[in-house]
């Protein structure tokens, strides 16, 4: 038997809402996706004026962070520098651009969060980090 920690839908939603709020406060219309530790979607929020591509992109970013256990901005950097095979960016359901982070609790990965729609992956990352910070007290158990 394997025992593992997992995000409740309530905590996943709280992270997504805090992420959306941070982006709104910064003036960005985005989509936010939270996936479980297996990359399966738990929550998707899309702001009113976020582009139609943003829900899929946010989900792909969250999936990629979980699948590779690495922030998507780091994956993009490694591909650009030639340290990773560029073909990885062509894998189904992946997005090797900034905006996807892992969610960890007490040393275990419990999910991922992806943001799409801010003007740049660094700004997507900032919003995603705010979402994780908002649930930090629920993760460190």
Image (cartoon, rainbow, N blue to C red):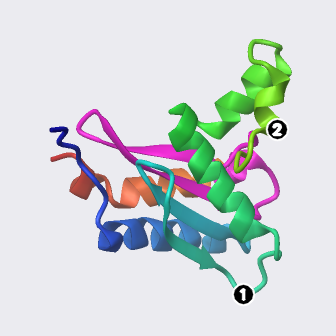
Q: Dot 1: few (<14), some (14–19), or many (≥20) neighbours within 10 Å?
A: few
For disc 1, the marked residue is 48
Q: Is residue 109 above or below residue 22?
A: above
Question: Position of 27 compared to 113: left or right?
Answer: right
Question: Position of 81 compared to 98: left or right?
Answer: right
| Position in image of residue 98 (x %, y %) | 71, 43
Whether residue 116 is visible to the viewer of this picture, yes or no, is: no
Q: Dot 2: few (<14), some (14–19), or many (≥20) neighbours within 10 Å?
A: few
Q: Residue at x 76, y 30 (%)?
A: 88
Whether residue 98 is visible to the viewer of this picture, yes or no, is: yes
Q: How many marks?
A: 2
Q: Residue at x 42, y 54 (%)?
A: 132
Q: Is residue 120 above or below residue 118?
A: above
Which segment is the magenta one?
A: 96-124
| Position in image of residue 135 (x %, y %) | 33, 59
Q: Residue at x 81, y 69 (%)?
A: 53
Q: Residue at x 37, y 61 (%)?
A: 134
Viewer-proximal residue among 83 and 28 = 83
Viewer-proximal residue among 53 and 122 = 53
| Position in image of residue 57 (x %, y %) | 73, 59
Residue 80's image quarter?
top right
Q: Secondary structure at mark 1?
A: loop
Structural distance between the alpha carbons of marks 1 and 2:
29 Å
| Position in image of residue 78 (x %, y %) | 73, 21
Q: Secondary structure at mark 2?
A: helix
Q: Residue furthest top?
A: 83
Is 112 one of the magenta-colored residues?
Answer: yes
Dot 1 or dot 2: first in sequence order is 1
Q: Which mark is residue 90?
A: 2
């Amino acid at each position: 038997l394997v025992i593992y920690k997992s995000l409740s839908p309530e905590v996943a939603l709280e992270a997504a809402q805090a992420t959306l709020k941070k982006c709104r406060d910064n003036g960005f219309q985005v989509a936010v996706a939270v996936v479980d530790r297996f990359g399966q979607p738990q929550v998707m929020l899309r702001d009113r004026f976020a582009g139609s591509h943003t829900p899929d992109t946010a989900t792909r970013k969250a999936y990629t962070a979980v699948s590779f256990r690495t922030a998507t901005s780091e994956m993009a950097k490694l591909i650009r520098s030639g340290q990773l095979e560029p073909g990885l960016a062509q894998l189904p359901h992946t997005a090797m651009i900034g905006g996807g982070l892992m969610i960890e609790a007490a040393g275990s990965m419990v999910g991922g969060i992806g943001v799409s729609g801010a003007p740049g992956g660094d700004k997507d990352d900032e919003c995603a980090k705010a979402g994780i910070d908002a649930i930090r007290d629920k993760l460190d158990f």
